[in-house]
Amino acid sequence: MSETAPYNPFADLGIEVEPLIREALGGPPMFHDLSTDYTSLTRLLEFLGQRYFSGVVSIRFFDFDAHVLLYRGRPYHASSFHGARALAQEEALRKILDDARTAEGWIAVHALPDEMFPEEWELLDPLASPALPTRDASPTPWRVETPESPAPSGEGRPPVAASAPPIAMPTAETQTVAEVPTISSDGIDAVAAAVEITQANASGVVPSVADAEVLSREAGVEAAEAAGESASASTLAEVTAEAGGEAESTVEREDDAGAVPSGTAPIGSPEAWARLIEHMHARFRKIKGRALAGRLERELNDKLLPGGLRLYGGRVRGDLTQPVPALVIAARHCFAVLQHLGGTGFAEKALESGLHEIGVIDAALYRETVGAPTAS
Amino acid sequence: MPRFTAALLAIGVLLAGTLVLLIRRPVGVAEQGEWFALGSAALVVFPTVAAVASFAAASAFPAEEAGRSVWRSIGLAAGMWALGRAIFWYYQMAHHQRLPFPSPADAFTLGCFLLLVVALAREIRVAWGVLTRAQAVALGALGVVGLIAGYIVFLEPVAAEGLSSFGGWLSLTYGVVGIALLPLCLVPAVAYIGGLEGYVWSIVSAAMLCIVAAILWFANAIFLETWSVAHPSTLLQTIGFSLLAAGALWQRQVQASL
């Protein structure tokens, strides 16, 4: 039983927070079991803020649990239970950030779609914390507008502006919160940036985050596999081109996409394209199996590597803060392969569900870009 | 309960009940008559169920896609099989003797095989291209081994009787086409291994194995005049078409989940 009832601003608006937290914790986490020994909660919240993340950051300490509920990158609710004393809001957030620096705990991040938050959330003020940098009231843009037409505005996304500040990659030196302007959108790099990398770890090997080593190891294995692969195993696109005449025109169109017209930027944000590729690839893997999905992954990486990106573990890794034409090329290739190995219906459903998942309103532009037939 | 699960359960219960009734060996003329009636009914009902399920799977695909024609052909094949078996059953009941071999019923059986070949050819048209060399070689070797084994077990006695009659050639055709169906069924199962469609085609391959083994056994027995009312090939056919129905329903479920 709490000694003092913490102030609950949500009660005035009739908003229930606990169901949202339960819903988030019930789903699979984006990140999990990040130890506070090597993870800066402050930096992690900052990273999530940059990504307009909505969801719950839960921290499991030895003797208590804590939750921070974020909506579009800002913390709106924090709660922790210290024995008989329950803390909430700013007081809880302060305590959580302090304890994360000193006590051993385990952090998990669970996402929630923006649609789950009622409209009344717009009326709330985010929690103020001196430890967290404030964000502009008008969020900076992330997509790039083409000269000919404005970029589509995704559902639930902040408005797009014409320019974005250049993104600096974090160095291996110890960095403070104030020094780091922004963080790469790659999940692993972001977690690594949240980790306090000291001079002793200047080699870039992040303790307990084995992904970087796995990535380099996998790259070596895949290179060996590609070299030893049978000559008869041509690309999935070539195979499907041989299978039917109509495939050839799509493959040619897909190959033509390799030359993005100069002076224009791809429609849509790089992150949206990356999520779309991930979604279509995941659907393909589910229906057609690991072997074919692995081949598709290698072919997509051939398209993505020139743009400094890579599909690994079902996620597109790399810097997604700048427009990358390779993403559009890869998306077109992915759609073409889905279309010819699974049928047009399968490919279109995968595309539609992917666009729905990333919250795209104007799907027609994406459909046209990947070469999907015009919806009737 | 979801409709897919309910349908699978119904097929399972029907199969279990049928096997329980047919597994016993009939003693006496009366029991033989009952067994034959039940067995013949099963050989019409289960292919019909498989045909309905296959058409349901076909309807889950968009009109212009290959999957629709593949499963429609499989449905037609199962339907033709059921029709052939119905003719066989009617003749037996009406004339109290088995249908001579070959007969009009064999036209439907042959039609069934040809439709299955057409269906598989359409399905593997794309799947074959994504097989690795090792997989293609393995499937080819399996086909050769199956042909040799099938010939030794089922076809050599037929060939030994001399292939002077049309019945002999028909038996041989059943055998060769049936055995060839097995590696063809495995092509999509291997190509899409690990995926939902891989599982569907694995079940279809198992169904084909049962059906082909049953027909080889049946044709062999008919040709050599060793067939009896309670021939075990009936059970194998029943199991085979149950698996085909299950595979078709799962394909429909996969399409619905896209």
Image (cartoon, coloured by chain):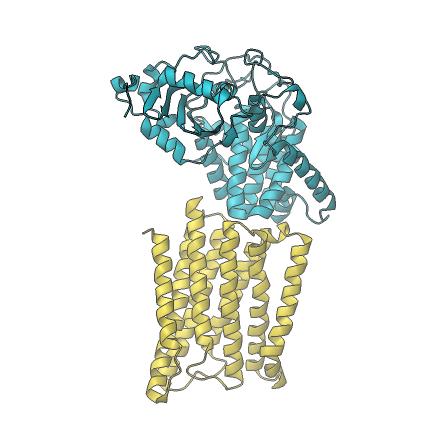
Chain colours: A cyan, B yellow
Residue B31 appears left or right of B251: left
Residue depicted at x 37% and y 24%: A82
Name the quadrant of the C terminus of chain A.
Answer: top left
Is residue A166 shown to the viewer in this render?
yes
Q: Quadrant of residue A188?
A: top right
User: Residue B131: x, y in percent?
Assistant: 63, 52
User: Residue A197: x, y in percent?
Assistant: 61, 21
Label tally: 0
User: Residue B58: x, y in percent?
Assistant: 44, 53
Q: Quadrant of residue A253?
A: top right
Along the line of sight, the residue nearer the viewer: A254 or B187: B187
User: Residue A320: x, y in percent?
Assistant: 57, 24
Residue depicted at x 52% and y 21%: A40
Single out the residue that lies furthest toward the bottom.
B28
Q: Quadrant of residue A175?
A: top right
Against B148, is A241 above or below?
above
Against B115, is A64 above or below?
above
Name the quadrant of the N terminus of chain A.
Answer: top left
Residue depicted at x 50% and y 54%: B199
Against A336, is B123 above or below?
below
Is residue B58 shown to the viewer in this render?
no
Against A262, is B20 above or below?
below
Residue depicted at x 53% and y 66%: B114
